[in-house]
């Protein structure tokens, strides 16, 4: 058995590395090779022999505090190619939550933000919370959608992540519990290969407070990952998913590597890999890509 582990932190001190090596050794594995991926933040790749990925992940997470860990099994002794990346949008691809910004225009920003926070923590059913939040937008002129879209800020490193993986032949997509009226123009602007979101119903230039069509919830996000992979002849180990909320957990679990990006506690706990830096591009390090191979934004 062979697996690869990446340790990522602003700095990796010698005691942490000793603890990692000891944990692997005591569990019956061996660190057969080391490779530095980045100095700032510090990212170190380990090739581990004699352990499967799940066991190595558990042992490393147990002894490493404040260190992001990503462990994956090999394909024919090598790390898999990266052929499909699917990302959440709000608080992942872009900073903040779009629906909270829309609700602020009707004076209900704080109220809706509280519901959003509970939904992303997994405390509320996503579908029910979506309908509840969208209902607050009834009567809002569609011109507000343009204002909110214009105010969006991509997460730091988002363009680097996309450009680097597309240069390597990967398909890049985004799936959102937000809205097509926001995501579709954004996807065109940054060159995504796929986008899916909910559609706000519009009548006479105003939002009705309802959504139409298929709801993009956690199950639908995972379904999109599987369908995209199957249609393009991509096997599961070649897929990557990144998200921050409970609505992303099925997608994260379905991917070859699922990454929790500055995520809610339940997602941090359940995701196979975590990323708690402010730069989305640092996900490339977890995938074993050296910093000097990143394409600039």
Image: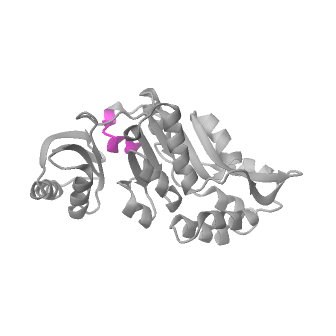
Quadrant placement of the N terminus = top left
Q: What residue lies at 76% left-to-right and 62% top-to-bottom?
A: 137
Classified by dominant secondary structure, the portion drawn in magenta counts as helix
Instruction: Using the rendered view, name the quadrant where residue 283 is placed.
Output: top left
Which stretch did the figure color magenta? 281-292
Query: Which of the pair 55/285 is nearer the observer?
Result: 55
Instruction: Using the rendered view, name the quadrant where residue 38 is placed.
Output: top left
Question: Looking at the picture, how far across and down is residue 140, in whole percent?
Answer: 80, 59
Q: Where is 56 relative to 120, above or below? A: above
Count how many numbered circles sit on residues in the image: 0
Q: Is residue 285 magenta?
A: yes
- Lateral position of residue 242 relative to residue 62, left or right: right
Q: Is residue 39 visible?
A: yes
Q: What residue lies at 53% left-to-right and 33% top-to-bottom?
A: 231
Q: What residue lies at 10% left-to-right and 58% top-to-bottom?
A: 26
Question: Looking at the picture, how far across and down is residue 178, in whole percent?
Answer: 64, 53
Q: What residue lies at 43% left-to-right and 33% top-to-bottom?
A: 83
- Lateral position of residue 142 relative to residue 132, left or right: right
Q: Is residue 255 magenta?
A: no
Q: Where is 110 relative to 30, above or below? A: below
Query: Which of the pair 224/271 is nearer the observer?
Result: 224
Query: Which of the pair 226/35 is nearer the observer?
Result: 226
């Amino acid at each position: 058995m062979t697996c690869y582990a990446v340790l990522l932190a602003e700095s990796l001190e010698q005691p942490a590395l000793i603890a990692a090596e000891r944990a692997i050794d005591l569990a019956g594995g061996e660190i057969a090779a080391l490779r530095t991926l980045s100095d700032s933040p510090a990212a170190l790749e380990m090739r581990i022999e004699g352990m499967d990925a799940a066991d190595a992940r558990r042992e490393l997470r147990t002894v490493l505090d404040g260190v992001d860990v990503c462990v994956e099994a090999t394909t024919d002794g090598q790390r898999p190619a990266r052929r499909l990346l699917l990302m959440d949008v709000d608080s992942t691809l872009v900073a903040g939550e779009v629906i909270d910004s829309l609700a602020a225009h009707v004076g209900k920003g704080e109220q809706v933000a509280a519901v959003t926070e509970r939904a992303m923590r997994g405390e509320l059913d996503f579908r029910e919370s979506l309908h509840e939040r969208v209902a607050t937008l009834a009567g809002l002129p569609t011109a507000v959608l343009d204002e909110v879209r214009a105010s969006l800020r991509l997460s730091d490193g988002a363009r680097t992540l996309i450009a680097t993986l597309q240069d390597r032949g990967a398909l890049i997509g985004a799936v959102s519990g937000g809205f097509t009226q926001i995501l579709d123009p954004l996807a065109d602007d940054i060159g995504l290969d796929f986008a899916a979101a909910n559609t706000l119903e519009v009548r006479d230039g105003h939002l009705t407070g309802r959504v139409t069509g298929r709801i993009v919830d956690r199950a639908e996000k995972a379904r999109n990952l599987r369908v995209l992979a199957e249609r393009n002849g991509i096997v599961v180990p070649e897929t990557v998913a990144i998200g921050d909320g409970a609505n992303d957990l099925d997608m994260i679990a379905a991917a070859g590597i699922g990454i929790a990006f500055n995520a809610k506690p339940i997602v941090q706990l359940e995701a196979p890999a975590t990323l708690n830096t402010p730069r989305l591009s640092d996900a490339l390090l977890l995938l074993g890509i050296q910093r000097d191979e990143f394409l600039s934004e």
